[in-house]
Amino acid sequence: MTKDESSREPLAVIDTWPVPHAAAARIHQTSIVTHGDTARRFRLASISKVITAWACLIAVEEGSVELDDPIGPPGATLRHCLAHAAGYGFDTPGSIIGVGKRRVYSNTGIERAARHVAERTGITFDDYVREAIFEELSMSQSTTKASPAYGMWSTVDDLVRFALEMMRPTLITPDTASLVRTIQFPELGGMIPGLGSYTPNPWGLGTEIRGHKSPHWTGTNNSEFTYGHFGGSGTMMWIDPTIDTALIALTDRDFDEWSEQALQQWRSLSDAVVASIR
C-alpha cells in the first residue's frame, strides 16, 4: 500500500469540526491520504457492527456457523440478526415485531449473532475477533471493550487496514465478502436512528446500504451502492465500490450532541471526496 501525505485536501476540513479530536483517511484504490492523529484511539460505537459481521462471515467460511442457523426469536436466523431483520428492538432482550416484518435497528441482534459464533467455536467473541481479524490484519490498536455491537475501539490507521480488507478481501472469499454490500430482505422498510424512516431501507450483513435514501449521512454524489456505517460516538466509514474509494472519519464527540452539524459535515466531506476522485 502507498500512503500519500502530500495532498491532504479535502480531509483538512475536519480541523474546523466542533469536536475535541478528529482524524480521517481517504482510500482510493491503493492510495491512502490521511489527516489528523491517525494513531489516536477512538470509540467506534456502531462501526463495531461491521467488524462483528466480518468476523461472523469468517466463522461461516470456517464451517463453524451457517447464515441460516436458527438463532433468536422463532424463525430468525444468523442472517436475520446481522441484517436487523430478526424482530429485536434496539436494546430489547426479546422480539418486538415478527421476524422479517420490518428493519428494526438493533444492538441485540448483533450481540446475539456474536454469541452464536462464540457458542459454536468455543471461545469468547472478543478473542475470536482479535485472533481472526485484529491479529491477521495487524490492527494492533484495536480492542473490544464492551458489546460487539458498539464497544470496539480503534484508530484511523487500523480502520484503513480493515477498509482495505473489505475492498480487497483476504480473510474470506470475494463471494462471501460481497454479502456485506448485497441487500438482504430487500422489501423491508424501517428506521435509521438519527436519520429517519425509509421504505425500502436496504442493509447488507452488518452494513447499511445507501440505496435511494434521502436525506442520508453520505454525500449526495455517493452512488446507491455505497455501504458502511456511522456511530453514536461521532464516527463514520463508507465504501463506494463504483469509484473504488473509502472514507473514514473518527471523532470523540457523541453524535447526539452535534447531530445536525455532524450530518452536514459528513455529507459535505463525502461530496468533496467523491468530487476529488471523479
Image (spheres, rainbow, N blue to C red):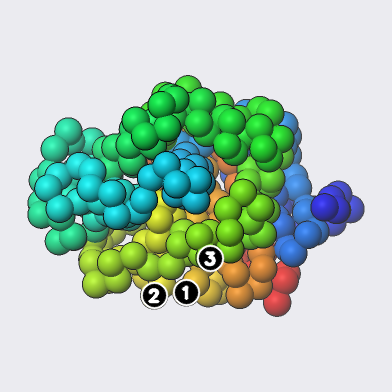
Q: Position of residue 117 (x, y in %)?
A: 39, 37
Q: Secondary structure under badge 3?
A: helix
Q: Secondary structure under badge 2?
A: loop
Q: Relative to 39, does residue 270 appear above or below in the rendering? A: below
Q: Earlier in the sequence, mark 1 or mark 3?
A: 3
- Label 1 to label 2, Cα distance in Å? 6 Å
Which image quarter: residue 205? Answer: bottom left
For label 1, the crowd category at 10 Å Cα-Cα, with few meaning under 14, some 14 to 19 and many 20 or more, is some
Disc number at residue 212? Answer: 2
Disc number at residue 224? Answer: 1
- Label 3 to label 2, Cα distance in Å? 24 Å
Q: Are marks 1 and 2 in contact (CB under 8 Å)?
A: yes
For label 3, the crowd category at 10 Å Cα-Cα, with few meaning under 14, some 14 to 19 and many 20 or more, is few
Which image quarter: residue 85? Answer: bottom left
Residue at image location 73% in from the left, 63% down from the top: 28
Q: Residue furthest right?
A: 6
- Count the marks: how many? 3
Disc number at residue 175? Answer: 3
Q: Relative to 39, does residue 255 appear above or below in the rendering? A: below
Q: Secondary structure under badge 1?
A: loop
Residue at image location 15% in from the left, 61% down from the top: 101
Q: Position of residue 113 (x, y in %)?
A: 33, 41
